[in-house]
Image (cartoon, rainbow, N blue to C red):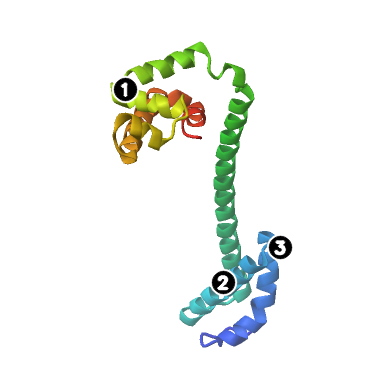
Amino acid sequence: MEVNNKINFNILYSTYYKKSFLFTKSYVHDDQAAEDIASESLIKLWEFMKNEDVVYPKVLLLKILKNKSLDYLKHQVIREEALNSINEFGMNDLEIRISSLETCIPDTLLSRELESLINEAIAKLPPQTRKIFEMSRFENKTNREIAETFHITTKGVEYHISNALKVMRMQLKDYLPVFYFLFYIN
């Protein structure tokens, strides 16, 4: 190819695109990335050739292709490391959840310690809130039945239960999965 500052991009593209694409693809192993790198490299070569005399355009193009391919591959390494880190975090979380479930022994969930913590938390509730909570969760009374007993609205019952659950949630934060199972699922 003749060296010419006024080189036509179409000629440059048709002369070097296929070689550029195949060279790049042999390293990046991705057709779309290879197409992008080859096209960007040819544009960079063309812009360079518009302003400078280039004696060996193939050599300059090869340098451009090499650098763009290296940048792409280095970015892929960073991307893979980030994905591996995310996957590793997910796997650790999954292993913790599996381990937690494997050590969960339903017969001991209401051990004396947990039962004591629950009773302490319930004892800290104001008397009316405590009684409403106990009727709801331990006596399986409906909100309407509780409202009639205390001569309040069902919204009032819901308010007391909600407050009781907030206190319980704070007191039993280390036992949240068990707490949700015991008190939120009716």
**Which tag is nearer the camera, tag 3 or tag 1?**
1
Q: Is residue 159 above or below residue 115?
A: below
Q: In front: 79, or 48?
A: 79
What is the x, y in percent for residue 88? 59, 38
Q: Is residue 32 above or below residue 158?
A: below
Using the image, tell me which numbered label, if any, was put on residue 26. 3
Residue density around tag 1, few if under 14, some if 14–19, many if 20 or more, within 10 Å: some
The type of residue carrying mark 1 is Leu
Helix, strand or loop for disc 1: loop
The type of residue carrying mark 3 is Ser
Helix, strand or loop for disc 2: helix
Q: Is residue 60 above or below residue 154?
A: below
Label 1: which residue?
A: 125
Residue density around tag 2, few if under 14, some if 14–19, many if 20 or more, within 10 Å: many
Q: CA distance from mark 3 to mark 1?
A: 71 Å
Q: Are marks 3 and 2 in contact (CB under 8 Å)?
A: no
Which one is earlier in the sequence, the residue at label 3 or at label 1? 3
What is the x, y in percent for residue 15? 66, 82
Q: CA distance from mark 2 to mark 1?
A: 72 Å
Quarter assignment of residue 149: top left
Residue displayed at 60% across by 35% down:
94
Which one is earlier in the sequence, the residue at label 2 or at label 1? 2
Taking the image as drawn, is residue 162 in sight?
no
Helix, strand or loop for disc 3: helix
Q: In front: 25, or 84?
A: 84
Taking the image as drawn, is residue 138 in sight?
yes
Using the image, tell me which numbered label, if any, was put on residue 3. none
What is the x, y in percent for residue 184? 47, 34
The type of residue carrying mark 2 is Ser
Using the image, tell me which numbered label, if any, was put on residue 41. 2
